[in-house]
Amino acid sequence: MKILILGNGGREYSIARAILNEKKGHELFFQPGNGATNTLGTNLDIKDYNQLAEFAKENAIELTIVGPEAPLVAGVVDVFKSHGLVVFGPSKQAAQLEGSKVYMKNFLAKYNIPTARYIETASIEDAFKFTNTLSTPIVVKADGLCGGKGVIIAMSHDEAKVAISEMLSGKSFGDAGKKVIIEEFLDGYELSMFAVCDGEDYILLPAAQDHKRLQDNDQGPNTGGMGAYAPTPLVDETLYQKVRERIIRPTLDGMQKEGAPFEGVLFIGVMVVNGEPITLEFNVRFGDPECEILMPLMTSSVSDMFYKAATNRLSEIEVAFSSQYAVGVVMASENYPYSNSKPAEIIVDEVHHEEIEKYTHISYAGVSMEDEKLYADGGRVLVCVGLGDTIKQARDRAYMRCGQVHFAGKKLRTDIAYQALA
């Protein structure tokens, strides 16, 4: 099968790697891809979605998988479907579940899906008034896409009001913050859950836990994610069932009523409070780095899952997962997440240790290739993934792989999966 993958991060690299591991002779294309994806397939430089769809038709691409949120919110799925192509991802209207936090929160309220108490507003007076009714900490969110960084957890009322002022003035996130959501802070533990959906049916994948803060012990600023592990022992079948009944099913039914059936990945940010799942937010694509740890755990066909979801036939397949655990550790560039970093050559030691060779791998993200040398371009550069029969074994192996990778200014956390190992 010829498959086109849209995106250039570790998420897209991991999806491609899992598809190639099926050994079914798939041929892969990436738009735009990164400096390492060209070892897995062909990178394309076609920015216009209609031209890209024409390329897909002319080259008999049988499946397109959209990785990141920006093209989904911009309507790439609608463009590809108008050309009669099979594409995995939500429509532009359905992608508003991530594209607009206001849309998402109002949808949750409309269909009685559990979420935190909130207000959505463009009025600074109304925002301040609601803020005064909340105890601290207080959550302040920009409405639009901010690359996973548009959420401020304010530790005081004054800090919350500064965040609100800077968002509404456009200082913090430009137009993405011209409308804000202020909501109560939920005290519990956070999970990442992913449902692969075809509009009516869905498959719930094993729950993962992400590490958003830059530094060990959850210190420092929020990032796009510094590491993750799955499956988490913090979830039992009772909790999975509550998520299915209270969040996923009413969401799919609600989106059908809204005239925007949800196809693609529904990423549910869940806060578990006293054993009850509360919806923090929806995203409409795989999380990154959660995708990097979920893909290698799948033992059934990854390409078949994407294809059946894209053709509304999920009920025809069973998805199977390994009994192992996976831990992913992000290596980021020197100035992440504050500013750009200078490109730095990546040196990966030759692997002589059978355990590292067999149970670990690297998923590349922010990298470029020049004169057959790989460079860290900035941001999150790569993810070292370890597999094991226990979380500790998987984590230890992931960090063994980290020790093989060198570039100037590399930055990583040393405590990924600490919640499960505490």
Image (cartoon, rainbow, N blue to C red):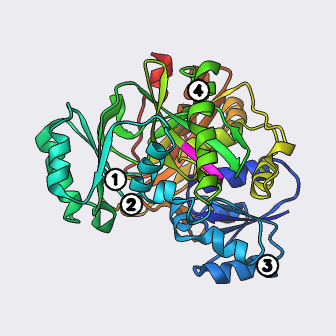
Element class at badge 1: loop
The C terminus: image quadrant: top left
Q: Residue type at mark 4? A: Lys
Query: Residue tagged by mark 4?
Result: 242
Q: Is residue 163 left or right of residue 265?
A: left
Q: Residues within 10 Å of mark 3 (few under 14, many from 20)?
A: some
Query: Residue tagged by mark 1?
Result: 150
- Per the rendered image, the range of residues in magenta is 263-267
Which mark is nearer the camera, 2 or 3? 2
Element class at badge 4: helix
N-term mark: 4 or 2: 2
Q: Is residue 382 left or right of residue 54?
A: left
Element class at badge 3: helix
User: In 3D space, how far apart are the residues under numbered discs 4 and 2 (Cα atoms)?
Assistant: 29 Å
Q: Is residue 305 left or right of residue 329?
A: right
In magenta stretch: residue 265:
yes
